[in-house]
Image (cartoon, rainbow, N blue to C red):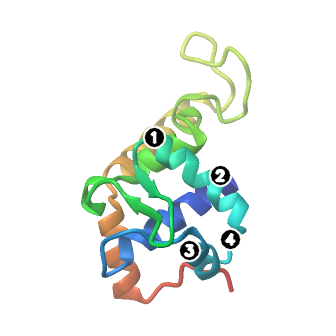
């Protein structure tokens, strides 16, 4: 359901949220730590920067940083910044014209699931996810 870009964007912002130190982190460091292609990650960060979730700084001490406290950034914002709101607004089958007036075969079931997913993502902050990673020793990297 989420694009690969969105998955990587979530992992990268979660990586930033889980760091003990504030400040800029080089994209190369994040790329290496998460095993995500540097050019691909750069494009994802451009989208997150444009949406106001990240800030960037050029130069030897540059990199990217979250613009707000991780407790104030939720997963919904990250999904919308990268994949837009389609996951939360469009037909799961991709059928044009699907809606309450002309529902597709999965419309009624999908609307409920979609709304629950949107609520889950809105109510889950990066800080909460970072805590879970530390509590459960979850790896962000691909093995």
Return the mark for residue 86: none
Q: CA distance from mark 3 to mark 2?
A: 13 Å
Residue 79: x %, y % from top left: 51, 47
Return the mark for residue 43: 2
Q: Where does label 4 land, which residue?
A: 36
Residue 29: x %, y % from top left: 56, 78
Q: CA distance from mark 3 to mark 1?
A: 20 Å
Secondary structure type for disc 2: helix
Q: Earlier in the sequence, mark 3 or mark 2?
A: 3
**Marks 4 and 3 in Cβ contact (< 8 Å):** yes
* Residue 94 picture quarter: top right
Return the mark for residue 51: 1
Return the mark for residue 30: 3
Q: How many C-alpha atoms fall within 10 Å of the one at disc 1: few (<14), some, or many (≥20)? A: some
Q: Earlier in the sequence, mark 3 or mark 1?
A: 3
Secondary structure type for disc 4: loop
Q: How many C-alpha atoms fall within 10 Å of the one at disc 4: few (<14), some, or many (≥20)? A: some
Give the residue drawn at x 48%, y 47%: 49
* Residue 51 picture quarter: top left
Name the mark nearer the viewer: 2 or 4: 2
Q: CA distance from mark 2 to mark 4?
A: 11 Å
Q: Earlier in the sequence, mark 2 or mark 1?
A: 2
Give left or right: position of 96 versus 129. Answer: right
**Marks 2 and 1 in Cβ contact (< 8 Å):** no
């Amino acid at each position: 359901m989420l694009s690969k870009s969105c998955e990587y964007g979530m992992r990268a912002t979660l990586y930033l949220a889980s760091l003990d130190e504030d400040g800029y982190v080089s994209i190369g460091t994040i790329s290496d730590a998460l095993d995500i292609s540097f050019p691909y990650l750069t494009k994802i960060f451009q989208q997150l920067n444009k949406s106001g979730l990240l800030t960037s700084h050029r130069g030897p001490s540059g990199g990217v940083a979250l613009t707000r406290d991780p407790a104030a950034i939720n997963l919904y914002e990250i999904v919308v910044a990268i994949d837009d709101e389609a996951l939360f607004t469009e037909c799961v089958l991709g059928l044009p014209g699907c809606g309450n007036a002309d529902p597709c075969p999965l419309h009624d079931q999908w609307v409920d699931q979609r709304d629950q997913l949107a609520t889950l993502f809105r109510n889950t902050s990066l800080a909460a996810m970072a805590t879970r990673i530390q509590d459960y020793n979850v790896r962000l990297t691909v093995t």
